[in-house]
Image (spheres, coloured by chain):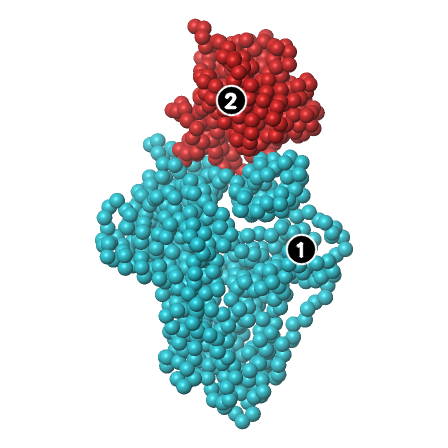
Chain colours: A cyan, B red
Amino acid sequence: MINTEILVIGGGPAGLCAAAEAAEHGAKVLLLDDKDVLGGQLVKQTHMFFGSHLQYAGTRGIDIATLLIENAKKTGVELMPGHTVTGIYEDGVVTALNGGKFIKIKPEKIIVATGAYENMLAFPNSDLPGVYGAGAVQTLMNVNGVAPGNRVLMVGAGNIGLIVAYQLLQAGIDVAAVIEVTDKIGGYYVHANKIRRMGVPILTRHTVKQVWGKKSVEGATVVQVDDKFRPIAGSERNYAVDTVCLAVGLTPLTELLWNAGCEMKYIPALGGHVAWHDENLRTSRENIYVCGDASGIEEASSAMIEGKVAGLNAARTLTRKTNLTQKAYDERLKDLRAQLGQLRRGPFGEKARMGNSVLAGLPPAIDEPIESLPKDYRTFPKGARVVIECEQNIPCNPCEAICPHNAIKVGKDIVNYPQLDPEKCTACALCLTRCPGLSLFVVNKDYSPTETEISLPFEMIPLPRKGDAVDALDRQGNFVCKARVTRVLTGKKFDRTSIVSIAVEHKYADTARHFRVNGTPRLEQKIVAPANIPEDMDAIICVCEDVTRREIEKVIARDRAQSVDEIKRLLRCGMGPCQGKTCQRLIMQILAGKLGRNIAEFLPQTYRGPMKPAPMGILAKAYDEEKN
Amino acid sequence: MKKKTDVVVIGGGCIGAAIAYELAKIGVNDVVLVERDTLSSGATGRCAGGARQQWSEPANVLLAKASIEKFKRFEEEMGRDIGLVNGGYLLCAHTPDEAERFKKNVKMQRECGVDVRIVDPKEINEITPCLNTETIVCGAYCPDDLHADPFLAVQGWAENAMRLGADVELHTEIKGFKKKGNRVVTVLTNRGDIDCNWVVNAAGPWSQDVGRMLGIELGTYAERHQIAVTEPVQRMLWPLVVDFQVAIYFRQSAHGSFVFGHSDPNEKPSYNIRGTWGFLQHISKKLTYMVPSLKDICIVRQWAGLYDMSPDAQPILGKVSDEAENFLVAIGYSGHGFMLAPVTGVLMAELIAYGQARSQPIEPLSIKRFQGAKKHKEHNVV
């Protein structure tokens, strides 16, 4: 039995910050993570992060992981990667498996920072190889260096769908389209703009109807939906793709919290069932804290601060008095809460604000009005300056921090639109390499009597060379004019973002925003779906136990099953190794639809340990060791 | 929900569902089966699903024999596949004393007409090549015993009861009773009251609570028993194996997974059904001792269920008090409810319809037995 004061479960942004915070205040902290490499999802994130410099905004996710791990080590956290937690038991013991060992830990406080898992969609042939979750695609591509396919249909236009589509393009993999079932792009427009100007269409109000293929995906049919999400007949389009990537949202990974007996609440704005928790992130079980996506889906920047809040409070409530004074605690908590409040400002913070209000049983939190207004920087008569094409109130301010001339102002309220002082801007272009949205450009209208030079951030390979002839593209990826590369700037300071300048005729100064190197225009391939796919083909819902949608509908109708547990007992769905992570949400959706009830009325299946399959030989060895 | 019925059966587990079905089958179809949660949500849904005839008490052997016959005809009668594995039961003895007891039991069981025999380690190896027979002296093997999926069986009983006219009311919790003289006249539930002629307490581990609503102490109590299941593997074991020395039982289900559990002698009466990490380690030790080739196979889930224990580990059937003469019980199965459910259904239905159990005497299982001096405790309990 390993004894520790604080056990942190999960080594992603929330867990690493929680552990470091608690250790900094004098607590003995142990952190477990099931992966061999710490950092959680950060290790797959090759893009620069939003937020404020306090959460490493403008730094790439993978580099933030390194910083957080180093910081946790420095504060004295004992890091144990490669350990999968399999249960939190009644006696307060936490069990974990690592390769060949079953270990038991007895902590005084537990901080659950287990993150989230991806939502799945079920459609005919959704079990064909080639249908991936976005997380798997990122792991293959960014961690293992393996291309998941050659041509991808991205499903979902939230930030994950948009970012992964961009990363696929960076890896030289074609993205046929991004489709989104709702009527608007859910992610940041600046992320959408990155792929749009490379010519990838984003179709809202579209969903996957089916995919097909003999042994793996060969194509997909998408269909438009009406405002009740019903497919519109005749609106089908086919894409020849070998990969369908699902980025349709995340669900907090809460099985350990259910297992520990924490009170759970269904809060749609937070992504599903979450453990009830107070402002200090303490759950209904007083020694268990929760933070990051496990406490409600948000951005990594909020997860880091939530982690610090949880770590601070866990340290504060230890029986042994640490070096944390009341005054220091109060000040730190106030500061962290202010940071969290900042990140939850504006339209993108609405879900977190609303979800946390509902959870606390409070009326909806009112967001103070955002003062700044967007200004149109695109047109100006002459000279050279930065053009800011940031169109939403995103909590983000690296441009302000990097500008050596104080020409960009975001202000204390980091959801403000950045404001440019044209008098101060020297068009040095440094800010171009720090904007996570790649939405800053330098436009030099005085480049030559006939030409304007447009400098743009560029994160693709191969880099063009000075003098290359390229096609200039507009914001939707359409051909604008022929152009010439005038400069290519790279440098350590630029952190792998290059600045490429192209010269275009003056009249294209406000339209050209990207370029194509080896220019063949993208062509949408017209293909037809094979005729042998039946119109009403069934779909697999539980992948572990091969249970289909129709079988589930049948037990609802015939056997009067009205809960996930009843369906599980009759059909075994959810009894496989994944313990319902894939199918549970889908089953709730089917139940809600068939019974005409709200999805909030349904409980997930009872979670039972061990949370991950545990080899009996290893468990038996643990028994022997205890006996001796 | 009906406001008036002939029989109210309390409990949607295997016992209640089988009683409702058998009642409806012999024509007493004005029946309401009430269940607090959902079908099989109590002890039944947590049990391992074995059915054997190898008992130390002759009355139990005869009851189990009748049940096994009914299980074998289940699919034909009910139109539902219940994942039946006709693999028999193998009991293992590790000491000469235990072997002697087995021999005595087998003799008695054979006299009851059960196809059971003593097998030596060599034969055990032939029946179950995966079993570690190192310390096994002999076994008692009944190829006629079987195991099945309890969820599907309960579903089968309930849906056939409904087909024959009975009502099944889920999410219906008993709140109390109204009596007139020495008769229960109304069952009070959270969804309304039901006037009735008969009440059957088939509430399993909660039978004691139902009894107390009438001021009757039934002497039953709930006790946690833990159990676990592995990922599915290719068929390697047909019989359900019971080992009283190692204190384990295990079977391989129709689905391929191993289901196994044990009894903890230190378990205290309670409604606690949370699993422990200690069980996980201990049961793995035991199972990998019995079947060494399972060491790399993973446990995917652990859970616990409640035995409805009676003082002598045998069921209590029929009337329990002169103060409530139309209040019947089918309780105290002490971990053997599933295997005795089919015969319980028949006996209780006969008791209600004809005033007595016709196919087998149930007097030995009356609550009155605890008033006498002589007790026959059932030993073959795991």
State how far apart marks 2 and 1 are (Cα). 50 Å
Q: Amino acid at mark 1?
A: Arg
- Between A330 and A617, the one nearer to me in the picture: A330
Q: Amino acid at mark 2?
A: Phe
Reading the image, the residue beneath label 1 is A230
Give the label, 2 or 1, closer to the camera: 2
Question: Please, is residue B119 above or below residue A303 in the view?
Answer: above
Task: Pick out the residue farthest to the bottom.
Answer: A449
Marked residue chain, label 2? B
Badge 1 crowding class, 10 Å Cα cut-off, few under 14, some 14 to 19, many 20 or more, is: few
Q: Quadrant of the C terminus of chain A?
A: top left
User: How far across and down, in percent of the image, does residue A306 sit?
Assistant: 38, 56
What residue lies at 57% left-to-right and 80% top-to-bottom?
A: A512
Where disc 2 sits, the SS reads strand
Question: What's the mark number on residue A163?
Answer: none
Reading the image, the residue beneath label 2 is B177
Picture quadrant where residue B20 is located: top right
Question: Please, is residue A307 above or below residue A526 in the view?
Answer: above
Question: Please, is residue B219 above or below residue A318 in the view?
Answer: above
